[in-house]
Image (cartoon, helix red, strand yellow):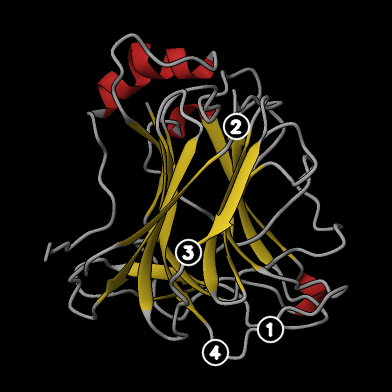
Amino acid sequence: MARSRRGPTRSVPLALALGAGVAGLALGMPSAAAATVDVVLLRFDGGTVGTEITSVVNEGASAATTTATVVKDTARAGRAITVASYAGSGTAADFPAFSTSGARAIMAIRPASGQPDTLNPGTARLEFGADIVLDSGTTAVSGSKDDGNNVVQRGLYNDKAQFKLEIDSGKPRCRVKGSGGAVEFSSSVKVTAGKRYRLKCLRPAGSNTVTLTVAPIAADGTVGAATSTSRTASAIGSLNYSATVPFTVGGKLSASLSLATPSSDQFNGVIDNVVLRLG
């Protein structure tokens, strides 16, 4: 059984990541060096437990080319709070509890004005995930402003490209959609509210197969054996985005960073160690 005292780590030094590798990814193509790069890495460390999270620090290689924002619904007391994470992992972000009226707080990262889109997978290796704790009593209510538990994503369902990790009816679920088609499926594992898990979706470079892994995390930071589920589509193709489309954590937003969607799919619970890894 492997032991992990931290969340995901950078695969290459930042100086290399911001060089040819990320430049290639910004064009939607695998880099010549084929290095994997954590373009987004959110640990949520450094805050005081019990205080509101009003800004986000991206420790990934895209930090210099992106902007990070916390979007919240103040009218409904939507906010994310700093809480203690598991041993060795500092602090985490606790998102709003379930509410049919929609108490919403969602984090967004997207390319800064005039900067290359270093969040664009193209046909490169795509990996995205996070550590999560789902609240008890979180129930999707169709038509409400809180109608799901989206962990991380880029793009909306009807967009030309989307990758998404969510929890649907208690089961982690991956969706990857590109120019050739989409694959969407759930894990066989049903998460237990109040327990920590590490969730990850992976599409190898140019592949039509996506693998979802779910691993429990003990209070001491021990990561247990992962359960893997894979699905193969007839084609997925390339994932290419407009620079205005945000990478979001804890729910979904429009390209204008608006919460005015039929439902926010607000995640109800704790998220830590968010990673978007390309290569």
Distance of label 4 from label 3 (alpha carbons): 19 Å
State whether residue 134 is above or below residue 198: below
- Please count the marks in the image: 4
Q: Secondary structure at mark 1?
A: loop
Q: Position of residue 212 (x, y in %)?
A: 43, 53
Residue on which the image places disc 3: 187
Residue on which the image places disc 1: 139
Q: Position of residue 198 (x, y in %)?
A: 35, 63
Q: Mark number for residue 234? A: 2
Report the amino acid beneath label 1: Thr
Precedes in sequence: disc 4 or disc 3: 4
Distance of label 2 from label 3 (alpha carbons): 20 Å
Q: Nearer the viewer, mark 1 or mark 2?
A: 2
State whether residue 111 is above or below residue 135: above
State whether residue 44 is above or below residue 211: below
Q: Secondary structure at mark 4?
A: loop
